[in-house]
């Protein structure tokens, strides 16, 4: 059973938060932190059950990650999470009443309405932030 449960939250759970989930899970595994469970969800329910946005999945594949198992979920308030990470300050506000924190130092921009290369830029920001979370979680272990 995992000793820590991290949930990453964005808007629809088809772009940023699933990318964060896949990347953080892979980096934690590389670091030998197998007792950390990583999940993701969205503040809205429009995409529940859908696969990740194809552009997000393609960006992940280009960097060697596999997001094919992802299915979108809506965030539900529960107390089984040790760490809730919001992709931007708007999500952080929507998660008031929880102890959510920002995933990255700056808001991770939503690439959904932009060009395909925006997904690569967002992924680079997610990878950098994930490295920092791995260090923090390792220090807590």
Image: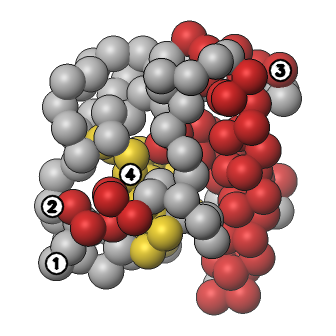
Cα gap from disc 4 to disc 2, whole angstroms? 12 Å
What percent of the width, then of the height, locates residue 63? 84, 29
Q: Are marks 4 and 2 in contact (CB under 8 Å)?
A: no
**What's the distance in space between the residues labelled 1 and 4, CA to CA?**
15 Å
Work out whether mark 4 precedes mark 2 in sequence or the reverse, and give the earlier one.
4
C-alpha span from label 4 to label 3: 23 Å
Badge nearest the viewer, 4 or 2: 4
In this figure, which residue is indicated by the disc labeled 4?
A: 9
- Res 72 → quadrant: top left
Asked if the residue under mark 4 is in contact with the one under mark 1, i.e. CB atoms within 8 Å, the reply is no
What residue sits 38% from the left and 35% below the top? 13
Q: Which residue is mark 2?
A: 77
Q: Earlier in the sequence, mark 1 or mark 2?
A: 2
Indicate the quadrant containing the C terminus: top left, top right, bottom left or bottom right. Answer: bottom right
Residue 62's tag is 3
| Residue 70 visible, this orientation | no
Q: Under tag 3, what secondary structure?
A: helix
Does 11 sit above or below residue 104? above
- Looking at this view, is 84 or 95 the one in front? 95
In primary-sequence order, the first of circles 2 and 3 is 3
Q: CA distance from mark 3 to mark 1?
A: 37 Å
The residue beneath circle 1 is 97
Q: Which of the two marks, 2 or 3, is nearer to us in this view?
A: 3
Measured Cα–Cα span from mark 2 to mark 3 = 34 Å
Q: Are marks 2 and 3 in contact (CB under 8 Å)?
A: no
Query: Quarter-wise, where is residue 77 in the image?
Result: bottom left
**Mark 3 residue crowding within 10 angstroms, few (<14) / some (14–19) / many (20+):** few
Residue at x 26% of width, y 22% of height: 47
Q: Is residue 116 above or below residue 75?
A: above
Give how far across and how far down residue 53 sits, in percent. 49, 17
Element class at badge 4: strand
Badge 1 density bin: few <14, some 14–19, many ≥20, Cα 10 Å: few
């Amino acid at each position: 059973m995992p000793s820590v449960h991290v949930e990453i939250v964005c808007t629809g759970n088809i772009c940023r938060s699933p990318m964060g989930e896949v990347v953080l899970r892979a980096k934690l595994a590389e670091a030998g932190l197998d007792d950390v469970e990583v999940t993701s969800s969205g503040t809205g329910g429009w995409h529940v059950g859908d696969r990740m946005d194809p552009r997000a999945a393609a960006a992940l594949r280009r960097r060697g990650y596999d997001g094919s198992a992802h299915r979108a979920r809506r965030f539900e308030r529960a107390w089984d999470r040790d760490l809730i990470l919001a992709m931007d300050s708007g999500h952080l506000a929507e998660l008031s009443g929880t102890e959510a924190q920002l995933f990255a130092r700056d808001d991770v921009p939503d690439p959904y309405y932009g060009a395909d290369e925006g997904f690569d830029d967002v992924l680079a920001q997610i990878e950098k932030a994930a490295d920092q979370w791995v260090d923090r979680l390792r220090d807590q272990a």
